[in-house]
Amino acid sequence: MIVARGRGDAATMLSTMRREIAAIEPNAVFLDNQTLDAQVAATLLPARLGAVGVSVVGVVAMALAAIGLYGVIAYAVARRSREIGIRMALGAQPSAVVALVLRQGLGLTAAGLGVGTVIALGAATALSRALYGISVVDPMAWGATIAILVTVAALANALPARRAAVIDPSTALRAE
């Protein structure tokens, strides 16, 4: 006799049930019996694989965006090295130069976030109409996404900003 006490392991209980039923009816055939957790996992596998695939594509897209932003800011710093050298020669503090470069890079980020948010709102609206349980307004998701994007952009701006802060004014003025 099977007695379930407390919350036992479902897989163990399933094997016990098979053994007990086989003892009662030796000719019983078990066809694809599994726990509810295993059945749900098998049913949701395609959706989970799709979500993992979309997540991987999203991470690659964010990495490419960070590399692109880094390249644009590094190029802008290289083009402005003479100007930055003059600022340093006239007494600008390295922190002011870092702030100048970060302001430029985060300005690009803000513009990208503005355009991306409008496009994402449109996509979220379309998804909410097509799928059950998808809400356009999810402050946690929107806030986390924006925070991650701003953090990645700040990291992509950090190296060019640090390079700009250590530009030697005499070398920068002799260049070109």
Image (cartoon, rainbow, N blue to C red):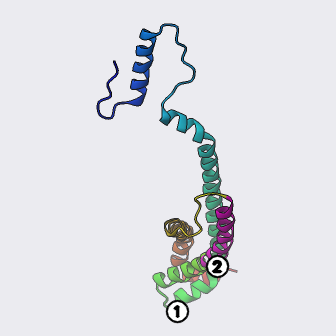
Residue 90's label in the rendered image is 1
Bounds of the magenta span? 110-130
**Where 144 falls versus 164 (above or below)?**
above
Res. 75 visible in picture: no
- Looking at the image, which residue is at 60% across and 78% down? 110
**Quadrant in the rendering for residue 58:** bottom right
| Residue at the (33%, 35%) spot, across then down | 7
Q: What's the magenta bit mostly, secondary-structure-wise?
A: helix
Q: Is residue 50 magenta?
A: no
Task: Report the residue at 65% width, 57% height from top.
Answer: 131
Amino acid under disc 2 = Ala
Marks 1 and 2 close (CB-CB < 8 Å): no
Residues 118 and 164: in front is: 118
Under tag 1, what secondary structure? Answer: loop
Q: Is residue 118 found left or right of 37 in the rendered image?
A: right
| In the foreground, 144 or 106 | 144
Q: Which residue is mark 2?
A: 111
Which mark is first along the chain, 2 or 1?
1
In the image, residue 108 sits, relative to residue 51, either above or below, namely below
Q: Residue 101 sits in which quadrant?
A: bottom right
Q: Is residue 24 above or below residue 64?
A: above
Give percent across and percent down for residue 3. 32, 24
